[in-house]
Amino acid sequence: KWLNILKYSVLTSSSEKIDRCPSGGEGIGNRMKAAIADASSWDDFIQIVKSKRYTYTRISRLCMQLILDIDRLRFTGSIPAYIRILGLSERGREMIAEVKKKKKNRLPIITNINREYEALGNTGRLLMDLDVRGADIYNLITGRDIKFNSDHRVTPVIR
């Protein structure tokens, strides 16, 4: 499933568009376009594109950025718009509650997207939408139930 979505994204994007992704540049778009037809799996594609110049991790990030249509130019000069908590200990939960209560944080701390989404500015909402869309696509491709694994339903893990 991943490979078909990746192939679609690479085949419908120009080399220049691929290079404009945050992890793109340096001609990697040309290399990806040349390799996509020969790939038999997601990992195979990355292995074909990988080199000393283009690491496995960089190519993996670039593939997700391309699938999510994330363009470097849209975020040039932007600073983080929020802090999103994915998991924490009981002590961490207490600390986050205290920081929120005393309003000591410079950035919004997101523990519940549904409750805190509107408090984000335009850039924060745009970034949160990308975050949620990425998680939904990941859940779709890995066969996880989108409804029950949606970031709108899942709360931070407390251990």
Image: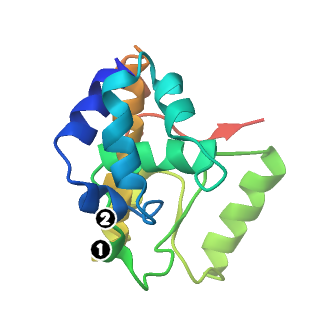
For residue 115, above or below residue 145: below
- Within-10-Å neighbours for mark 1: few <14, some 14–19, many 20+: few
- Within-10-Å neighbours for mark 2: few <14, some 14–19, many 20+: some
The residue tagged with tag 1: helix, strand or loop? helix
Camera-side residue of 30 and 106? 30
For residue 101, above or below residue 58: below
Q: On the rendered structure, is 63 left or right of 61?
A: left
Residue located 34% across and 31% down the image: 36
According to the picture, the residue beneath numbered tag 1 turns out to be: 74
Residue farthest to the left?
A: 12
Q: On the rendered structure, is 78 left or right of 137?
A: right
Residue located 42% across and 38% down the image: 135
Q: Amino acid at mark 1?
A: Arg
Say whether marks 2 and 1 touch (CB < 8 Å): yes
According to the picture, the residue beneath numbered tag 2 turns out to be: 71
Camera-side residue of 3 and 31? 31
Q: Is residue 114 visible?
A: no
Q: Position of residue 116 (x, y in %)?
A: 40, 61
Q: Position of residue 84 (x, y in %)?
A: 55, 58
Camera-side residue of 70 and 159? 70
Q: Position of residue 32 (x, y in %)?
A: 38, 43
